[in-house]
Each structure stands twice: as structure tokens, then as C-alpha cells.
Image (cartoon, coloured by chain):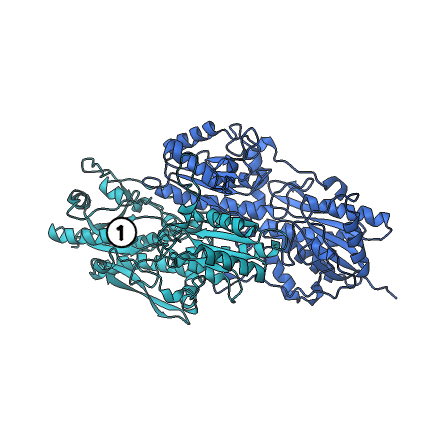
Chain colours: A blue, B cyan
Amino acid sequence: MSKTPRNAFYAQSGGVTAVINASACGLIETARKNPTRIGKVYAGRNGIIGALKEELIDTSKESKRAIAGLLTTPSGAFGSCRYKLKSLQENAREYQRLIDVFEAHDIGYFFYNGGGDSQDTAHKVAQLSQKLAYPITCIGVPKTVDNDLPFTDTCPGFGSVAKYVAVSTREAALDVESMCETSTKVFVLEVMGRHAGWIAAASGLAGQFPDEAPHIILFPEVNFNREKFLARVKRTVKKSGFCVVVASEGAHYANGQFIADAGSKDAFGHTQLGGLAPVLANMVREELGYKYHWAVADYLQRSARHIASAIDVKQAYAVGKAAVDFALEGQNSVMPIIVRKSDKPYRWTVGHTPLAGVANVEKAMPRSYITRDGFGITDAARTYLSPLIRGEDYPAYKDGLPRYVRLKNTLIAPKLKKFKLNT
Amino acid sequence: MSKTPRNAFYAQSGGVTAVINASACGLIETARKNPTRIGKVYAGRNGIIGALKEELIDTSKESKRAIAGLLTTPSGAFGSCRYKLKSLQENAREYQRLIDVFEAHDIGYFFYNGGGDSQDTAHKVAQLSQKLAYPITCIGVPKTVDNDLPFTDTCPGFGSVAKYVAVSTREAALDVESMCETSTKVFVLEVMGRHAGWIAAASGLAGQFPDEAPHIILFPEVNFNREKFLARVKRTVKKSGFCVVVASEGAHYANGQFIADAGSKDAFGHTQLGGLAPVLANMVREELGYKYHWAVADYLQRSARHIASAIDVKQAYAVGKAAVDFALEGQNSVMPIIVRKSDKPYRWTVGHTPLAGVANVEKAMPRSYITRDGFGITDAARTYLSPLIRGEDYPAYKDGLPRYVRLKNTLIAPKLKKFKLNT
């Protein structure tokens, strides 16, 4: 006689991506293949908040087809949140609540799909469960467009943003090039990346030869020098007729001031919350007089499932699947990671690393990935980045639009009293 | 004994699109199929400027494969320009120069691929050729993302921008929806459309039901009312938890002031050249306090060949092909147009209309396409727009990036003296 298998809890955390649902798909499909080991998979409504508020989505109510549809649906199908649990000392109350909710619903597996903060939370829950002698297997599932988790070769979510940015840069560059004789000479594209320039670096894949666009990439890793920047813009326009600039939102001056914050003030004296693209464009206009255009990709870049990287989708699915596999193997307090076996041909596998080492460690972009002048990427960067954007994995379309699934997201009946979140 | 066939001149004009090269492809391939009727196809380097400067690209130097590649390559492969020829009275000199260049290179066909201004120029060249007794067949080829040419059901270029905007809106809306519990509640996407709201209207296709995103569309056709807008944002956030706004760059107040121009001043007292998305976002923050994000698609939207509408690509090719077919049928001073035969199923054919009627007439979006409250699109608009974004027509990829062709663009030897452009 086998005993009833314990249930699993899964939550999506932080900024969503084009492929975080692919991880959910891999995780839920794999759990469903092991009904004697894992009972139901409950998903947190709006991430970890769903656990704290005991708002648990019963994913067993979703059809096989709906779950399969997660593979090609961007964003967080169960809702995500920006909610960081403080340390165990400061915040015993919320950690205790998590354990209470897990216990109330016989949850024996905690899968947390997010970035560094989430891995930290998963690690703390693992520590606490030992202390409280409540057995729960805690597995982190990596996700972040920022590509800043350590140990894993890349973070699911990054490859698709990288592909979006590289493709968009190539396309916009052709546009500017064809118009530059009489019209726009400088184009600025602002991309995500507050602390690291991984996403901006990916735009460099758009050009294959020294003078091809993008001509200038601005990284948070390199202090912005106005004069050097303007001189390079001028030189590029003189030589090529036009200049394409791709800038990380986090690019800043040597004193730490973001370029974006150097813009004008509004009527109330607030800094205009403008993004750095218009600030750079104004700089070009005022100093060099060139006609310009600028774009800010913002959420379009991280939700662009229509142009997701096939490799990224595969890896996102694989880490979701591996989370369950590792749990069933008896691993605990680990995070699946992508391990690169070789560059050419690109080969990878899934390994795992202890959560203790992952928590709150940011992986910086190596300086060797940036050219000496600070405006471009090196061959080492290309070797690393290129495989991550390979392959297309198109969603199905209906009437010209992608068919993205919308789940039923049925909540189970709560068993505990209401809980007030920290605010 | 057949006499030597006369040559053709083709030029791309104004803002480029994801499919203007598809028109070039249709035109050049059709001309090549008629070698006894049309000699070489010369393309203007950077549009009509190429004719004035006698910088003529010999397209016969391009391989069959390169020309075929134009079908899937965005932007203007021969270069485009913003250069409007003034009236014949004011500017006899430049028109005379065109005729001189055409005569020097035995050009008997003038194909001008552009918007209203270009059709006007083509019409004037036709008039002049009669006056000067220099026989030349003038055919306009429609192109504009603005969808503002009269008589044609749609303009090649529009359907692909419409698809890009609808797909991006659907994707970004999923992103905001999944984050809204604890993070961004209002997302603003700025799209093109200075005079007409066609492109913004297309975003409405992203949502199929009344409360689906986009919740608010701002059109140039509807005067912007700050209070009404903010009230609607507030109501939407209260009801749905988040609010997606898509705004035409040309949206303006009743007094004609662009929303974009109502932003703050920079240190020199210049209006911050910011675009309207950040201005709207600031408005929301100051009055309602919601967390927001904003994006400006700018050139990304019109160069996004990776997500072009298959219908748009077909129509762009068809008008290029028809331009040659009509010329060989003996038509003159006409523009091929898309004629809609039925909505469901969507059926269309190519007709033609006299250039005299097209020149400088802008097609406005019917008021009946906008809901009474001014914030959405009607079923009539859906019926019109929906077929235009149908079908995907993906370019080939290599190493994760679209393979866009780059032509050799070999100039022929000039025969005339240098010519100074008007400035």
C-alpha cells in the first residue's frame, strides 16, 4: 500500500519573461508524470504572496492542452510579484506562515521560479523547515532576463530578450541606414539592464563586421563619458553616414549618476522620469545637430514570445523539468543550472548547484566581453552570446495574433485564517 | 526586328517599411520577365535624389537570389529620402533635370514607390513629359505605414506595423497583468501616427473582449482630455487591476497642442523632446500615484520584418508587380490599388486609380471606427483591420538572426554634368 503523495507548491517571482511559463510547463508536466510521488501542483496566485495569503491555484484543474500551451505563452500565467521576504530574524512571522500554509495543504515540495532574491527565499525556507522539523524539498528554478545568476551558464529568459534586442537592432539599423542621406542620422535604442550590460551586449550580435550597426553600445560596466560618446557619434556619422546606439538603462557617469537622471526637471522640480534614450538623443541634437530618433523597448523586450530563442525555450523547460527530477532524486536546497559543454557546436546539459551559494550573488559581465574603447563587444562575448539566441520557436497564431493560453486559475478553499502581509 | 526596349527607373521614397522591398521585388522580377519590353531597371540611390544626382543603381547586376531576398528584407534596399519636389512653377529646374536624366539613360518608365508626396511627384513628371513631348510612363507604387493614401483599401506597409503593434500590445499586456498586484499598474505604449490613428487602432485587435487590454487608445482624431483620461485610467485599474494605454504620437489637446509637447522644459528652456509616452506616464504618476512603465516603439515598429503580416507582404509584392503589368498594358499616370472584394472571407484584388486624384489627398480614419467614448475601436474597425494582419511570413534565419539581403548597389557611369540640389 502506497501512502498518498505529498503536494507541490510552485510560484513565479519578480519580473516575468517570455519563457518563465515554459519552466512552469516543464515542471507541471513532469510532476504529472509522477503521480505516485507528487500529488497536486499548487501555484501561488501572484507568486509567493499566493502562499502567504493562502491563495493557491489548483493546476490539476487545467487541461493537458492548457499546460502544454504554457510552453509558448509569455509572462507569468499564475501572476508574479515583487515581494522580497526579509531575513529569518527580521521576519520570522512570514516564514512561519509559509510553513503553516504548506503544512495545511500537505505540501512537500517548494519550487520557486525567480532570480537571486527568490533563490534566497527558497534557501531560507529550506533552513527553516529543518529547524521546525517540517520536511519540505526546496528547489529554486532560475529565471531572469538580467542573466545575473551565478553558476548557471545563462538564465532562462535572457536568451529571448537577447534575441529580441539583436533582431530589433538589425532591423532598425537597416531603416536608419536607408534614410540617413536626408533624414535621421542617429538612432538610440534603450534596453533593460540596470546593473549589468548583458542585454545591451546582445545587440552587438546584430552586426558582424567592424563598421556594422550597432556602432555604439553603452554598458553599466563602463562609466559614461559625454565627450567621448559625442566624438564617437560624430566620427561614426562622418564615416558611415549614420550611427546606431544601444544603451543599457543603467548606463551612468563615473560619479554614479544615471544618464537617465541627467535629464530635465518637470514643473515640480522632479527629475523627468524619461529614460536615457531621449536624454542621449537630446545630447546629440544639441552638440552635433543631427536628426535623431529613439526607441525604448521596455516590456516589449521581455514579453516578446513571438521572437523567443528556441534554445532559451528549451532551457526554460529543461530547468522546470529538472527541478522535479532533482526533487524526486532526493536533492534538496539546490537550483538546476545550465552547464555549457562546448561552444562550437553548442552543447549544454542541466546540472545543479546548492542554493546557499546562489543567494544574493550577482554575476557581472566580464570586462573581457567589452572592447577596450568601451563601446562594443569582443569575440569572447560573441562566442558566449551567439548560441543563446539560436533557433526560432514560434507560437501558434489565429487571425494574425499569437494564441496565448489563459488558464482557469481555480483557487482551492483556504483552511487557515487570513494573514496580513508586511507592508 | 524589335527595337531595343527602353529602361525603367524605380525609386523608394519617404519613411521605409517592413515590406517596401517586397514591392521592389515584385517590380524587378516582373520587369525581368519582360526583357523585350523593358530593358534595365535602374534604381535611384536614396530615392529621387538618385535621379537628380544621376546616381543610378543598375539592378541587373544583382543576382536572381538577391532580388528574391528583397521579399523578406525590411527597409529600403536602394536607400530612400525625404525630399519633396515643389510645384512645376516653382521648381521647373528639378523636373527638367529628371527628364534630362531619364532621356540620357533612355528611361521610358518611371516607377515611384511612396506616399502622397511621391504620387504627386509622379503625377507631375507625367504632366511634364507630355508638355516636353518626352514619352515616359509614370506609375506610382503605394507605400506608407500611415495608411493614409486614398482609393486603395490599405497601403502596403501598414498591415505589418499593425501586426507588430497588435502582437506587442497583447504580449506587454500579459506582462503587466501578471505583475500588477505588487508592481506596474499602468503601461503606456507610444506608436506612430502623427495625423491619423490607424496604427494605434490596430492595437485594439490585441483584445477581443470589452475589458481586455488595451484599455485605452488615444487617437489624433479625438481631442485629448486630461481629466477624462485620468478618470478612465483610475476606473480601469480599480476594475481590472491594471491599465494598458496605446497612444498615437499625434494625440493632442483640443487647442492642437501635442501631448508630447506638454512635457517639461530642459535647462535651456527647450521643450523636452520626449515623446508622449513619458508625459502620459508622468501624468498618471502625479495624479494617481500608480507605478508605471512606458515604451516607445519608434522605428522598431516599421522595420519589424520578423513579424510582418503575410497579407501585407503579398500586397506589397502585388502592387510592385502590377505597376509593371499596368505600364506594359499601356496605362499611364496611375497607381495600383488594393481593392477589397469581401471581408469574410477576406478577398482582394489589384486595381488602379489615376495619380491626379491621389496626389496630396489624405485618407482619414472614419469616426465610426472609434468608440463613442473615444478610447477604443468599434466592430467596423475590427472588420476592416483584422484581415490586414493575417498570416505570418517569416524571413530565413542564420545563427539566430534574420538573413536580410544587402545588395551590391552598383552605380552606372553618369553621362551628364553634376547637378546641385535645391536646399
Q: In this view of the protein, which residue sits in the foreground, B398 or A277? A: A277
Q: Looking at the picture, which amino acid does disc 1 mark?
A: Ser
Residue A330 in percent (x, y) is at 81, 51
Badge 1 crowding class, 10 Å Cα cut-off, few under 14, some 14 to 19, many 20 or more, is many
Q: Which residue is mark 1?
A: B118
List x then y, in percent, for residue A300: 52, 50
- The chain under label 1 reads B
Q: Is residue B141 above or below residue A414?
A: above
Tell me, yes or no, if residue B313 can be seen here: no
The answer to which image quadrant residue B2 occupies is bottom left
**Residue A136: image x %, image y %?**
81, 53
Q: What residue occupies the far front of the structure in this picture?
A: A268
Q: Is residue A12 left or right of residue B24?
A: right
Location of the C terminus of chain B by quadrant is top left
Q: Is residue A239 left or right of residue B40?
A: right
Tell me the element at label 1.
Answer: helix
Q: Residue at x 30, y 46 (%)?
A: B59
